[in-house]
Amino acid sequence: MRKTAFIIALISLVSAWCINQYNLSELRKDGVELRLNETVITADDDSYIAPARNFLETGELKNNLKDKSAYFLRPPGYSWWLIFHGGVQNSAQLFTLKITQTLLFSFSVYFLFFIAFDFLNSKKLAAITSAVYGVSTIASGFLFYTLTEAITPALVIFLVYALIKSKNEDRTRRKQLFYFLSSALFAALFITRPVLGVFALGLFCFILFDFWKNKKQLVITVLAAFLIAFTPMALWQIRNSTIAQQYVGLHPIYFNQHSSTCFRPTHQALWTLNKGWGEKGARFHEYFGEFWSAGINGDTSSTQREKFISNIPKHVIQALGRKNIDEMLHHYQVSILHQKTFHDAKISMPQKLPNSEVETIKRIEQLVRQYKQKLPLEYYLTSPLKVFKTLAFHSNLSLYIYQKTLRGNLLMEGFRLLAYGFHALIFTLLIFSVFSKTTIEYKSLFSITVVLYVGYLIFIQRGIEERYTLPIFAIALISSTQVLQQIVGKVKKGKLKKPAL
C-alpha cells in the first residue's frame, strides 16, 4: 500500500514540476512577464506578498494601501507561508517556494491514496483516483503561483486524512491527539481561506460520533478542538477590530475607508445586483472598471451610464426600468466624485459612509428587491444554474500551455475534452453523494460539507472563478467515485438476480 502510494506521489511530483516548468518556459518565450522570472503574476499576488515583505522589513503585517484596510484586507495564512520563504524577495526564494509547494502537492497525493482506500475500500479505486488527481496535472496548475490555491488543496487533504486517522485509532489518548492535529490543520486552512471554514462541520461531526458514548471525553475533546481550531482566527478578528474600531468580518474587501480602489460598499451593492442574472465576475469588472475609472477621472457623463447599461440584459432593463437604472448610476457617479477628493489626496475616507453612497446603496437595494419580485425564477433558479455551469463544466486546465501554446493540437484537444467531461461528471454526481450509503460522519465530510461549499458559491457568492473549486476537488473526486461505485454495484447485483418465474 505504501509503495503504491509512494510511486503515485513520486510520479505526481515529477509531472507537476515538469508541466509547470514547461508552462513558464512558454510564457517567457511569448514575452509574458513573470515575477522575478520564476512564478506567474496575477492581480491578487501583491495582497499576499506585500504583507509578508512589510512584516520582514518593518514588523507590520500590512499591504501598501493607504487606509486601515491595509492591515486586514487578506487573511494572514498565505502571507505567513510567504514569510517562511523569506517574503519571496528574490528569485532564489521564489524558486524555493515552487519546490515546497510542489512537494506539498505530492505529499497530499500520497495521503489522498489512503483517504480513497479508507472511503472506497478498494486499492484499485484508490490508485486510480489518486493518480488521476496527481498525475493528470488537472489539479496542479497553481503550484507556480503566489495564491492560496497553491496550498489550500493540500491542507484540505491533510485535514481529511488526519480525521480518518483519528477515527481509526483505538487508544483514546492517541485518538484525541490526532483530533487536536486535525483542529490545528483546520485552523491553518480557516485563516488561509475563510470560506473553507465549512470543514468545521466534518471536524466536529467526527469528534461527536466518535466520543458519543464517553460524555466526559467528548466534552474535553470538543472544547480543546474548538479552542485550537478557532483561536487563531479569533485573535486575527480581535486585532482587526481594534485597528479599524469596528468589526470588519472574515473577508473585509469592501471597507468604508477605501479611497484608492473601487472596492467600497457601493461596489458590493452593485455587484450583488449584477450577480442576480448570473453575470461573470471578469465581465462585470471589465465594464464596471471602465465606469469607475471614468468617474474617478472626472467623467460622470450620461455616455458612461449608457455604456454600463448596454451590458445589462434587455429583459432586466425592461423589468427594472431604464430610468431607474440610469438614476441609480447617476447617484453612483456622484459618490465616485466624492471619493475622488480623497483618492487624489491619497488619504483615507471617513469611517462613516457619505450621504451620496448611502443614497446610492439604497437605490441599488431597491432594484435588487424589484428584480427578485419580477424575475424570481431567474434569480433563485436559472442564475444559480448558470453559475453551477461555470463552476463545473470546464476542464480545469488553466495553464498557459493548455489555453494558448497547445491550443488546436489534436492530442491536446482530446485531453481537454476528456478533462472537461471528467470535471463536469464529478460535480454533477456530487449532489447524489448526499444519498450515498455511508456513515453520518463520513457523509458530513465527504458530501454535506462539499455540497454546502458548492451551494455557497452558486447561491451566495455567485461571481466565481474556476479556481475556486480546486480546494475541494480531491474530496469531490472521491465522493463522486463512491457514487459511481454504488451505482455499478447495484447494476451488477441486478444482473445477477434471476428473473421471476
Image (cartoon, grey):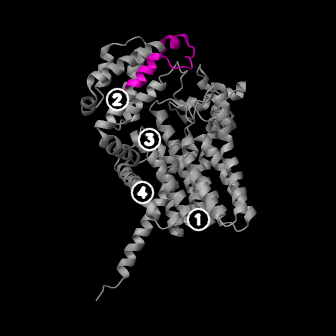
Give the residue pinned by disc 1. Answer: 4
Check disc 1 and give the amino acid type: Thr
Q: Earlier in the sequence, mark 1 or mark 4?
A: 1
Determine whether, in the image, residue 474 is placed left or right of residue 98: left
- How far apart marks 2 and 1 lie (CA) works out to 58 Å
- Can you see residue 143? no
Check disc 4 and give the amino acid type: Ile
| Closer-to-camera residue (376/71) | 376
Determine whether, in the image, residue 356 is placed left or right of residue 56: left
Give the residue pinned by disc 4. Answer: 431
Residue 439: horizontal and vertical position, in percent?
54, 66
Q: Nearer the viewer, mark 1 or mark 4?
A: 4
Residue 146: horizontal and vertical position, in percent?
57, 36
- How far apart marks 1 and 4 lie (CA) works out to 31 Å
Vertical relation: 335 (above or below) 501: above
Q: Earlier in the sequence, mark 2 or mark 1?
A: 1
The crowding category of the residue bearing disc 1, from other C-alpha atoms within 10 Å (few below 14, some 14 to 19, many at least 20), is: some
Q: Earlier in the sequence, mark 4 or mark 3?
A: 4
| Closer-to-camera residue (411/55) | 55
Q: Earlier in the sequence, mark 1 or mark 3?
A: 1
Check disc 2 and give the amino acid type: Leu
Instruction: Tell me what residue is drawn at x 46 percent, y 42 percent.
Output: 399
Q: Answer yes or no: do the residues labelled 2 and 4 have beta carbons within 8 Å?
A: no
Q: Is residue 356 magenta?
A: yes
Give the residue pinned by disc 2. Answer: 367
Instruction: Single out the residue that lies furthest toward the right.
Output: 173
The crowding category of the residue bearing disc 3, from other C-alpha atoms within 10 Å (few below 14, some 14 to 19, many at least 20), is: few
SS for dot 2: helix
Check disc 3 and give the amino acid type: Ile
